[in-house]
Image (cartoon, rainbow, N blue to C red):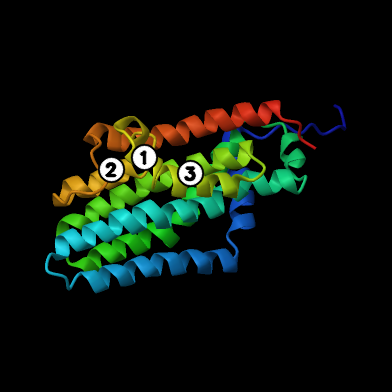
């Protein structure tokens, strides 16, 4: 018998969980958690204030769609998602993951999973609380579903941006402010490239309140944000496979 011990490479599932925990530990700092909680709490406060308006259904739906889904979640996803792979690349630490005998798709998949895990309690839960505070029953489940879809879409988008661009935060802010707030108004074609239009359509359809850009079909509202996350894994895997890792 040979005295040499042979070490088998980890399975894909094991590698995925190890990488996921690595990303999770690196991003869930006290400062970031506090910042995300402040953004989420602001949505609850705004909803509580506007529920006393003449039309609380319209006011609450508008706050959740225009602030929570279109501003708060994108900013939270950008702060976390863009730095997951981006920070490792800038700190020259990505090479250590690349030296592991794991499939390349593990890294972006684990990054999106970590971003999703962080944003659910710190962004999604405050939105659901805001919906409960509003007193609009139709808004509660719709807000939960819409916020989960928004987190999936924006997490994928900004994780991919972090893998592709050196200054992903700048590019992400340009997308949120310039594209989603301005360019998306130009035509239906540009509006379809605004992730915010898909979760907003979910809450608009549930409450019957007209929301800016919220005219996507039910199928598209569910399919597109998930497709963005899947495409982000494919794109990030391709980008990371072509870039010089040092």
Cβ atoms at labels 1 and 2 below 8 Å apart: yes
Above or below, comparing residue 192 to residue 181 in the picture: above
Q: Mark 3 sits on what residue?
A: 175
Residue shown at the point (30%, 69%) measured from the top left: 46
Mark 3 surroundings within 10 Å by alpha-carbon count, few (fewer than 14), some (14 through 19), many (20 or more): some
Asked if residue 35 lies left or right of residue 42, the reply is right
Query: How far across and down, in percent of the image, does residue 190 sit?
Result: 37, 33
Q: Nearer the viewer, residue 122 or 199?
A: 199
Residue shown at the point (33%, 41%) measured from the top left: 185
Q: Nearer the viewer, residue 200 or 189?
A: 189
Which mark identifies residue 131? none
Above or below, comparing residue 29 to residue 173 in the picture: below
Cβ atoms at labels 1 and 3 below 8 Å apart: no
- Measured Cα–Cα span from mark 1 to mark 2: 8 Å
Give the SS element for disc 2: loop
Where residue 225 sits, quadrant-wise, is top left
Mark 1 surroundings within 10 Å by alpha-carbon count, few (fewer than 14), some (14 through 19), many (20 or more): some
Query: How far across and down, in percent of the image, does residue 67 sit?
Result: 35, 58
Q: Mark 1 sits on what residue?
A: 184
Mark 2 surroundings within 10 Å by alpha-carbon count, few (fewer than 14), some (14 through 19), many (20 or more): many
Query: How far across and down, in percent of the image, does residue 206 sit?
Result: 17, 48
Q: Earlier in the sequence, mark 1 or mark 2?
A: 1
Q: Where does the C terminus fall, quadrant-wise?
A: top right
């Amino acid at each position: 018998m040979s005295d040499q011990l042979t070490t088998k490479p980890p399975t894909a599932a094991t590698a995925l969980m190890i990488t996921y925990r690595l990303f999770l530990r690196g991003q869930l700092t006290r400062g970031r958690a506090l910042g995300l909680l402040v953004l989420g709490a602001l949505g609850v406060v705004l909803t509580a204030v506007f529920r006393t308006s003449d039309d609380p259904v319209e006011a609450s739906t508008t706050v959740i769609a225009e602030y929570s889904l279109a501003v708060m979640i994108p900013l939270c996803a950008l702060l976390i998602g863009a730095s997951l792979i981006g920070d490792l690349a800038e700190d020259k630490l990505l090479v250590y993951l690349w030296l592991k005998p794991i499939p390349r798709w593990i890294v972006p998949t684990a990054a999106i999973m970590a971003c999703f895990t962080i944003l659910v309690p710190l962004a999604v839960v405050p939105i659901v609380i805001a919906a409960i505070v509003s007193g609009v029953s139709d808004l509660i489940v719709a807000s939960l579903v819409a916020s989960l879809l928004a987190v999936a879409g924006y997490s994928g988008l900004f994780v991919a941006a972090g893998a592709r661009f050196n200054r992903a935060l700048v590019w992400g802010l340009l997308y949120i402010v310039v594209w989603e707030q301005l360019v998306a108004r130009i035509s239906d074609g540009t509006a379809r490239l605004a992730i915010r239009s898909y979760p907003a359509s979910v809450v608009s359809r549930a409450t019957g309140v007209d929301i800016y850009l919220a005219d996507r079909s039910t199928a598209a509202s569910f399919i597109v944000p998930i497709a963005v996350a899947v495409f982000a894994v494919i794109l990030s895997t391709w980008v990371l496979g072509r870039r010089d890792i040092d």
